Image (cartoon, grey):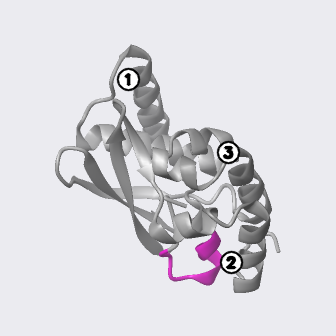
Amino acid sequence: MDFNHPYSRFAAVALAAVSVLGITSACSSDSDEAAGNAAAAAASGPEPKTVDGAKAAAQTVFDRFSGGDFAGAWELYTSAGKQAISKDDYIKLNEACSRKGLAIQLTSARMEGTDKAIVIAKQLVAAQSYTMVYEKDAWKLEPAKEGLALYKLGAAKAIAAQKKAGTCANA
């Protein structure tokens, strides 16, 4: 969701809210399969510590965010992401400012060490990298520094900041 997650590196101002807040996703048979694989892995034990495991987890976050399941997206954040914003504030912020349903496609991914993967996603004409971190036997989205700073404001101030910056999609 590094709003990584996030989230704030898209060049287009119209997409900045999405990039700061996290994520959107394409709904395709590949993403459905990836989401199913991530769910199956979670149910059967630790997720695979592979680039494919990271990609599947990232796609699940993107699908949840894109579909408006902000609570579900928040659940797949790193502990640092969850500490920066409560689930309730994350939901309020995204309901107020995010764009739902914009397709995002994973274009590539790579491992960076054994506990971190960088996934590249493309949305419309903009590409962005997201960091996935292996935490407690599962891949989690690590929000970008800009997203963490925004989240620490709390929902009301973050919404106001996004409206002022022109990055709140629903303003």
Q: Is residue 169 visible?
A: no
Q: Looking at the rendering, in which quadrant would you find the C terminus?
A: bottom right
Identify the residue under disc 1: 41
Image position, residue 131 (x, y; %):
36, 57
Q: CA distance from mark 1 to mark 2?
A: 36 Å
- Counting other residues with Cα less than 10 Å from the Cα at mark 1, is it few (<14), some (14-19), or many (20 or more)? some
| Residue that sits furthest to the right in the current view | 171
Please tell me whether mark 3 or mark 2 is closer to you in this view: 3
The amino acid type of the residue labelled 1 equals Ala
Badge 1 marks a residue whose secondary structure is helix
Mark 3 or mark 2, earlier in chain: 3
Badge 2 marks a residue whose secondary structure is loop
Q: Is residue 16 magenta?
A: yes
For image coordinates 71% across by 57% down, the residue present is 94
Mark 1 or mark 3, earlier in chain: 1
For image coordinates 23% across by 38% down, the residue present is 50
Q: CA distance from mark 3 to mark 2?
A: 21 Å
Report the front residue among 85 and 12: 85
Image position, residue 134 (x, y; %):
32, 41
Please tell me whether mark 1 or mark 3 is closer to you in this view: 3
- The image's mark for residue 93 is none
The amino acid type of the residue labelled 2 equals Thr
Q: Is there CB contact under 8 Å for labels 3 and 2?
A: no
- Counting other residues with Cα less than 10 Å from the Cα at mark 2, is it few (<14), some (14-19), or many (20 or more)? many
Q: Is residue 55 above or below residue 8?
A: above
The boundaries of the magenta stretch are: 9-18
| Residue that sits furthest to the top in the current view | 44
Identify the residue under disc 3: 87
Identify the residue under disc 2: 167
Mark 1 or mark 2, earlier in chain: 1
For image coordinates 66% across by 55% down, the residue present is 101
